[in-house]
Image (spheres, rainbow, N blue to C red):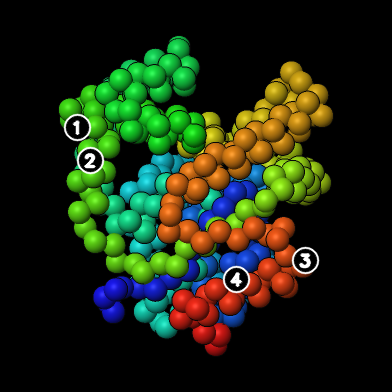
Amino acid sequence: MPDNKIKLISIAGPTASGKTALSIEIAKKYGGEVISADSMQIYKYMDIATAKPTPEEMGRVPHHLIGFVEPGDEYSVAQYVTDASDAIEKVSSVGKLPVLVGGTGLYIDCLLDGVVFSDAETDPKLRDKLQDKLDKYGLDYMLSELEKFDPDSAKRLAPQRNPKRILRAMEIYYSSGVTMTEQNLRSKSEESKFDPVMIALNYRDREILYSRINRRVDIMIEDGLIEEARAFYSSCQSNTSNQAIGYKELKPYLDGEKTLEECIETLKRSTRRYAKRQLTWFMRNKNIKWFYVDDYKSQDEFYSAVFRFLSLKGFEFI
Protein backbone atom coordinates (compact mmCIF):
# COMPACT_ATOMS: atom_id res chain seq x y z
CA MET A 1 0.00 0.00 0.00
CA PRO A 2 1.56 3.28 -1.09
CA ASP A 3 2.51 5.61 1.75
CA ASN A 4 0.68 8.55 0.21
CA LYS A 5 -2.74 6.98 0.70
CA ILE A 6 -4.83 8.39 3.52
CA LYS A 7 -5.54 5.94 6.30
CA LEU A 8 -9.05 6.00 7.67
CA ILE A 9 -11.51 3.89 9.62
CA SER A 10 -14.91 3.18 8.08
CA ILE A 11 -17.85 2.11 10.27
CA ALA A 12 -20.93 0.73 8.53
CA GLY A 13 -23.98 -1.31 9.40
CA PRO A 14 -27.76 -1.09 9.68
CA THR A 15 -29.69 1.68 11.35
CA ALA A 16 -29.85 1.53 15.16
CA SER A 17 -26.86 -0.82 15.39
CA GLY A 18 -24.71 1.60 17.39
CA LYS A 19 -22.51 3.15 14.69
CA THR A 20 -22.70 6.72 16.01
CA ALA A 21 -21.66 5.84 19.55
CA LEU A 22 -18.78 3.65 18.33
CA SER A 23 -17.55 6.30 15.90
CA ILE A 24 -17.32 8.86 18.70
CA GLU A 25 -15.42 6.45 20.95
CA ILE A 26 -12.98 5.63 18.16
CA ALA A 27 -12.49 9.31 17.30
CA LYS A 28 -11.79 10.11 20.95
CA LYS A 29 -9.35 7.23 21.42
CA TYR A 30 -7.39 7.75 18.23
CA GLY A 31 -7.55 11.52 17.80
CA GLY A 32 -10.07 11.50 14.98
CA GLU A 33 -12.89 13.45 13.43
CA VAL A 34 -16.13 11.96 12.13
CA ILE A 35 -17.21 12.21 8.48
CA SER A 36 -20.83 11.21 7.91
CA ALA A 37 -21.81 8.77 5.16
CA ASP A 38 -25.57 9.14 5.49
CA SER A 39 -27.63 10.33 2.53
CA MET A 40 -30.32 11.89 4.74
CA GLN A 41 -28.26 13.40 7.55
CA ILE A 42 -26.79 15.81 5.00
CA TYR A 43 -30.03 17.81 5.07
CA LYS A 44 -30.70 20.73 7.39
CA TYR A 45 -33.55 20.64 9.91
CA MET A 46 -34.22 16.90 9.43
CA ASP A 47 -32.72 16.05 12.79
CA ILE A 48 -34.99 13.53 14.52
CA ALA A 49 -36.13 11.53 11.47
CA THR A 50 -32.56 10.94 10.27
CA ALA A 51 -31.21 10.15 13.75
CA LYS A 52 -28.49 12.76 13.52
CA PRO A 53 -25.92 12.79 16.32
CA THR A 54 -27.13 15.03 19.12
CA PRO A 55 -25.48 18.40 19.80
CA GLU A 56 -23.89 16.80 22.86
CA GLU A 57 -22.44 13.96 20.76
CA MET A 58 -21.15 16.34 18.10
CA GLY A 59 -19.63 18.44 20.87
CA ARG A 60 -17.43 15.54 21.93
CA VAL A 61 -15.58 15.26 18.60
CA PRO A 62 -15.77 17.30 15.38
CA HIS A 63 -18.32 16.07 12.80
CA HIS A 64 -18.45 16.77 9.05
CA LEU A 65 -21.14 16.58 6.33
CA ILE A 66 -24.13 16.77 8.66
CA GLY A 67 -26.95 19.25 8.11
CA PHE A 68 -25.38 21.35 5.35
CA VAL A 69 -27.83 20.91 2.43
CA GLU A 70 -31.21 22.60 2.14
CA PRO A 71 -34.04 20.02 1.99
CA GLY A 72 -35.24 21.47 -1.30
CA ASP A 73 -31.86 21.10 -3.02
CA GLU A 74 -30.71 18.18 -5.15
CA TYR A 75 -27.59 16.40 -3.92
CA SER A 76 -25.92 13.61 -5.87
CA VAL A 77 -23.59 10.74 -5.04
CA ALA A 78 -20.96 12.51 -7.15
CA GLN A 79 -21.29 15.61 -4.97
CA TYR A 80 -20.96 13.49 -1.87
CA VAL A 81 -17.76 11.86 -3.12
CA THR A 82 -16.27 15.29 -3.78
CA ASP A 83 -17.35 16.74 -0.42
CA ALA A 84 -16.33 13.67 1.59
CA SER A 85 -12.95 13.47 -0.14
CA ASP A 86 -12.31 17.13 0.69
CA ALA A 87 -13.33 16.59 4.32
CA ILE A 88 -11.16 13.50 4.71
CA GLU A 89 -8.14 15.24 3.19
CA LYS A 90 -8.65 18.27 5.41
CA VAL A 91 -8.91 16.13 8.57
CA SER A 92 -5.85 14.11 7.64
CA SER A 93 -3.83 17.22 6.73
CA VAL A 94 -3.96 18.45 10.35
CA GLY A 95 -2.83 15.11 11.73
CA LYS A 96 -6.26 13.80 12.69
CA LEU A 97 -7.70 10.38 11.87
CA PRO A 98 -10.74 10.43 9.52
CA VAL A 99 -13.54 8.21 10.85
CA LEU A 100 -16.14 7.57 8.15
CA VAL A 101 -19.47 6.43 9.57
CA GLY A 102 -22.89 5.81 8.07
CA GLY A 103 -25.37 3.42 6.59
CA THR A 104 -25.52 4.60 2.97
CA GLY A 105 -23.61 1.86 1.20
CA LEU A 106 -23.53 3.59 -2.16
CA TYR A 107 -21.87 6.65 -0.65
CA ILE A 108 -19.24 4.54 1.12
CA ASP A 109 -18.47 2.32 -1.85
CA CYS A 110 -18.18 5.12 -4.39
CA LEU A 111 -15.99 7.15 -2.06
CA LEU A 112 -13.61 4.37 -1.06
CA ASP A 113 -13.47 2.69 -4.48
CA GLY A 114 -12.29 5.86 -6.19
CA VAL A 115 -15.29 6.15 -8.50
CA VAL A 116 -15.01 9.10 -10.89
CA PHE A 117 -18.36 10.25 -12.20
CA SER A 118 -19.01 11.41 -15.73
CA ASP A 119 -19.95 15.00 -16.41
CA ALA A 120 -23.20 13.99 -18.18
CA GLU A 121 -25.87 16.48 -17.28
CA THR A 122 -29.47 15.70 -16.44
CA ASP A 123 -31.94 15.92 -19.33
CA PRO A 124 -35.01 17.58 -17.75
CA LYS A 125 -37.43 16.41 -20.48
CA LEU A 126 -36.22 12.83 -20.30
CA ARG A 127 -36.30 12.91 -16.51
CA ASP A 128 -39.89 14.21 -16.53
CA LYS A 129 -40.91 11.50 -18.96
CA LEU A 130 -39.38 8.80 -16.78
CA GLN A 131 -40.93 10.31 -13.66
CA ASP A 132 -44.36 10.24 -15.31
CA LYS A 133 -43.86 6.58 -16.16
CA LEU A 134 -42.80 5.85 -12.56
CA ASP A 135 -45.90 7.62 -11.22
CA LYS A 136 -48.12 5.65 -13.59
CA TYR A 137 -46.64 2.15 -13.36
CA GLY A 138 -44.70 2.04 -10.08
CA LEU A 139 -41.18 1.22 -8.95
CA ASP A 140 -41.28 -2.53 -9.64
CA TYR A 141 -42.19 -1.87 -13.27
CA MET A 142 -39.30 0.58 -13.65
CA LEU A 143 -36.89 -1.94 -12.14
CA SER A 144 -38.11 -4.57 -14.61
CA GLU A 145 -37.52 -2.10 -17.47
CA LEU A 146 -34.02 -1.31 -16.20
CA GLU A 147 -33.27 -5.03 -15.92
CA LYS A 148 -33.83 -5.44 -19.67
CA PHE A 149 -30.76 -3.39 -20.61
CA ASP A 150 -28.76 -3.14 -17.36
CA PRO A 151 -29.43 -6.20 -15.19
CA ASP A 152 -26.42 -5.52 -12.96
CA SER A 153 -27.66 -2.05 -12.00
CA ALA A 154 -31.19 -3.37 -11.49
CA LYS A 155 -29.90 -6.03 -9.11
CA ARG A 156 -27.72 -3.54 -7.27
CA LEU A 157 -30.42 -0.88 -6.93
CA ALA A 158 -33.36 -3.17 -6.13
CA PRO A 159 -32.57 -3.54 -2.39
CA GLN A 160 -32.38 0.24 -1.94
CA ARG A 161 -35.65 0.94 -3.79
CA ASN A 162 -34.52 4.52 -4.29
CA PRO A 163 -36.56 5.97 -7.19
CA LYS A 164 -34.07 8.73 -7.95
CA ARG A 165 -31.17 6.32 -8.50
CA ILE A 166 -33.27 3.94 -10.58
CA LEU A 167 -34.44 6.81 -12.81
CA ARG A 168 -30.86 8.06 -13.10
CA ALA A 169 -29.67 4.63 -14.28
CA MET A 170 -32.36 4.65 -16.96
CA GLU A 171 -31.63 8.24 -17.90
CA ILE A 172 -27.91 7.52 -18.39
CA TYR A 173 -28.67 4.69 -20.81
CA TYR A 174 -31.40 6.45 -22.79
CA SER A 175 -29.30 9.62 -23.20
CA SER A 176 -25.90 8.05 -23.89
CA GLY A 177 -26.43 4.45 -24.95
CA VAL A 178 -24.03 3.40 -22.16
CA THR A 179 -25.35 1.58 -19.12
CA MET A 180 -24.64 2.77 -15.61
CA THR A 181 -22.80 -0.51 -15.02
CA GLU A 182 -20.44 0.19 -17.93
CA GLN A 183 -20.02 3.79 -16.82
CA ASN A 184 -19.09 2.63 -13.32
CA LEU A 185 -16.57 0.15 -14.70
CA ARG A 186 -14.93 2.92 -16.70
CA SER A 187 -15.03 5.22 -13.70
CA LYS A 188 -13.18 2.81 -11.42
CA SER A 189 -10.02 3.15 -13.47
CA GLU A 190 -8.75 5.78 -11.02
CA GLU A 191 -6.99 4.33 -7.99
CA SER A 192 -8.52 5.22 -4.64
CA LYS A 193 -6.77 7.88 -2.57
CA PHE A 194 -7.71 6.08 0.64
CA ASP A 195 -6.42 3.15 2.67
CA PRO A 196 -9.48 2.18 4.71
CA VAL A 197 -9.94 -0.30 7.52
CA MET A 198 -13.58 -1.24 7.21
CA ILE A 199 -15.71 -2.55 10.05
CA ALA A 200 -19.47 -3.06 10.33
CA LEU A 201 -21.90 -3.83 13.14
CA ASN A 202 -24.59 -6.48 13.25
CA TYR A 203 -26.52 -8.69 15.69
CA ARG A 204 -26.63 -12.46 15.50
CA ASP A 205 -30.10 -12.32 17.02
CA ARG A 206 -31.98 -10.21 14.47
CA GLU A 207 -34.79 -9.64 16.97
CA ILE A 208 -32.41 -7.63 19.16
CA LEU A 209 -31.73 -5.27 16.27
CA TYR A 210 -35.45 -5.01 15.50
CA SER A 211 -36.17 -4.27 19.15
CA ARG A 212 -33.59 -1.48 19.07
CA ILE A 213 -35.22 -0.09 15.94
CA ASN A 214 -38.69 -0.17 17.51
CA ARG A 215 -37.42 1.55 20.62
CA ARG A 216 -35.63 4.18 18.56
CA VAL A 217 -38.89 5.01 16.77
CA ASP A 218 -40.67 5.35 20.12
CA ILE A 219 -37.97 7.73 21.32
CA MET A 220 -38.20 9.74 18.10
CA ILE A 221 -41.93 10.20 18.66
CA GLU A 222 -41.26 11.29 22.24
CA ASP A 223 -38.59 13.73 21.04
CA GLY A 224 -40.95 15.50 18.61
CA LEU A 225 -40.85 13.62 15.30
CA ILE A 226 -44.49 14.42 14.55
CA GLU A 227 -43.89 18.15 14.88
CA GLU A 228 -40.73 17.88 12.78
CA ALA A 229 -42.63 16.00 10.04
CA ARG A 230 -45.43 18.57 10.08
CA ALA A 231 -42.91 21.41 9.71
CA PHE A 232 -41.13 19.53 6.92
CA TYR A 233 -44.26 19.06 4.83
CA SER A 234 -45.32 22.65 5.35
CA SER A 235 -42.04 23.96 3.95
CA CYS A 236 -40.64 21.35 1.56
CA GLN A 237 -42.30 19.61 -1.38
CA SER A 238 -39.31 18.13 -3.12
CA ASN A 239 -36.96 15.48 -4.21
CA THR A 240 -34.57 13.22 -2.42
CA SER A 241 -35.22 14.53 1.07
CA ASN A 242 -38.82 13.33 0.73
CA GLN A 243 -37.42 9.78 0.78
CA ALA A 244 -36.46 10.09 4.44
CA ILE A 245 -37.97 7.29 6.47
CA GLY A 246 -39.89 8.95 9.26
CA TYR A 247 -41.81 11.56 7.31
CA LYS A 248 -43.70 9.74 4.58
CA GLU A 249 -44.94 7.11 7.05
CA LEU A 250 -46.46 9.82 9.25
CA LYS A 251 -48.07 11.79 6.41
CA PRO A 252 -51.34 9.79 6.48
CA TYR A 253 -51.70 10.76 10.14
CA LEU A 254 -50.93 14.41 9.41
CA ASP A 255 -53.54 14.30 6.61
CA GLY A 256 -56.13 12.74 8.91
CA GLU A 257 -56.26 9.51 6.92
CA LYS A 258 -54.87 7.07 9.51
CA THR A 259 -54.39 6.88 13.26
CA LEU A 260 -51.06 7.73 14.83
CA GLU A 261 -50.71 4.15 16.08
CA GLU A 262 -51.10 2.79 12.54
CA CYS A 263 -48.51 5.18 11.18
CA ILE A 264 -46.01 4.45 13.96
CA GLU A 265 -46.30 0.73 13.23
CA THR A 266 -45.75 1.44 9.53
CA LEU A 267 -42.67 3.49 10.40
CA LYS A 268 -41.24 0.68 12.52
CA ARG A 269 -41.86 -1.82 9.74
CA SER A 270 -40.29 0.47 7.11
CA THR A 271 -37.22 0.98 9.27
CA ARG A 272 -36.80 -2.75 9.88
CA ARG A 273 -37.00 -3.38 6.14
CA TYR A 274 -34.46 -0.64 5.51
CA ALA A 275 -32.09 -2.29 7.98
CA LYS A 276 -32.42 -5.57 6.08
CA ARG A 277 -31.57 -3.81 2.81
CA GLN A 278 -28.53 -2.19 4.42
CA LEU A 279 -27.29 -5.57 5.65
CA THR A 280 -27.80 -7.08 2.20
CA TRP A 281 -25.68 -4.31 0.70
CA PHE A 282 -22.82 -4.45 3.19
CA MET A 283 -22.67 -8.26 3.32
CA ARG A 284 -21.42 -8.24 -0.28
CA ASN A 285 -18.24 -6.41 0.71
CA LYS A 286 -15.54 -8.95 1.51
CA ASN A 287 -13.23 -6.26 2.93
CA ILE A 288 -15.48 -5.60 5.93
CA LYS A 289 -14.68 -6.98 9.37
CA TRP A 290 -18.00 -7.72 11.07
CA PHE A 291 -18.59 -7.27 14.79
CA TYR A 292 -21.70 -8.89 16.27
CA VAL A 293 -22.60 -6.66 19.17
CA ASP A 294 -24.61 -9.31 21.03
CA ASP A 295 -21.54 -11.56 21.19
CA TYR A 296 -20.31 -9.33 24.03
CA LYS A 297 -21.56 -9.09 27.60
CA SER A 298 -21.26 -5.32 27.79
CA GLN A 299 -20.62 -2.26 25.67
CA ASP A 300 -17.16 -1.91 27.20
CA GLU A 301 -16.30 -5.49 26.21
CA PHE A 302 -17.53 -4.80 22.67
CA TYR A 303 -15.49 -1.59 22.39
CA SER A 304 -12.40 -3.38 23.71
CA ALA A 305 -12.73 -6.01 20.99
CA VAL A 306 -12.92 -3.30 18.33
CA PHE A 307 -9.90 -1.52 19.79
CA ARG A 308 -7.89 -4.76 19.80
CA PHE A 309 -8.71 -5.29 16.14
CA LEU A 310 -7.71 -1.73 15.26
CA SER A 311 -4.43 -2.09 17.17
CA LEU A 312 -3.63 -5.11 15.00
CA LYS A 313 -4.19 -2.85 12.00
CA GLY A 314 -1.62 -0.38 13.26
CA PHE A 315 -3.81 2.21 15.00
CA GLU A 316 -2.58 3.53 18.33
CA PHE A 317 -4.32 5.50 21.09
CA ILE A 318 -3.31 9.11 21.40
Task: Identify the residue shown where x is 23% and y is 24%.
Answer: 174
Circle nearer the viewer, 2 or 4: 4
Of the residues under marks 3 and 4, which one precedes in the sequence? 3
CA gap between label 3 and label 1 equals 51 Å
Of the residues under marks 1 and 4, which one precedes in the sequence? 1
Residue 90: x %, y % from top left: 38, 73
Q: Helix, strand, or loop for circle 4?
A: helix
Circle nearer the viewer, 1 or 4: 4
* Other residues around mark 2 within 10 Å, as few (<14) / some (14–19) / many (≥20): some
CA gap between label 3 and label 4 equals 14 Å
CA gap between label 1 and label 2 equals 7 Å
In this view, the residue in front, 31 or 277, is 277
Residue annotated with mark 1 = 178
Circle nearer the viewer, 3 or 2: 3
- Vertical relation: 173 (above or below) 46: above
Residue 145: x %, y % from top left: 35, 18
Residue 14: x %, y % from top left: 59, 49
In the image, farthest residue toward the top:
136
Of the residues under marks 3 and 2, which one precedes in the sequence? 2
Residue annotated with mark 2 = 183
Q: Amino acid at mark 4?
A: Val
Q: Amino acid at mark 2?
A: Gln
CA gap between label 1 and label 4 equals 43 Å
Residue annotated with mark 3 = 297
Residue 83: x %, y % from top left: 38, 59
Residue annotated with mark 4 = 306
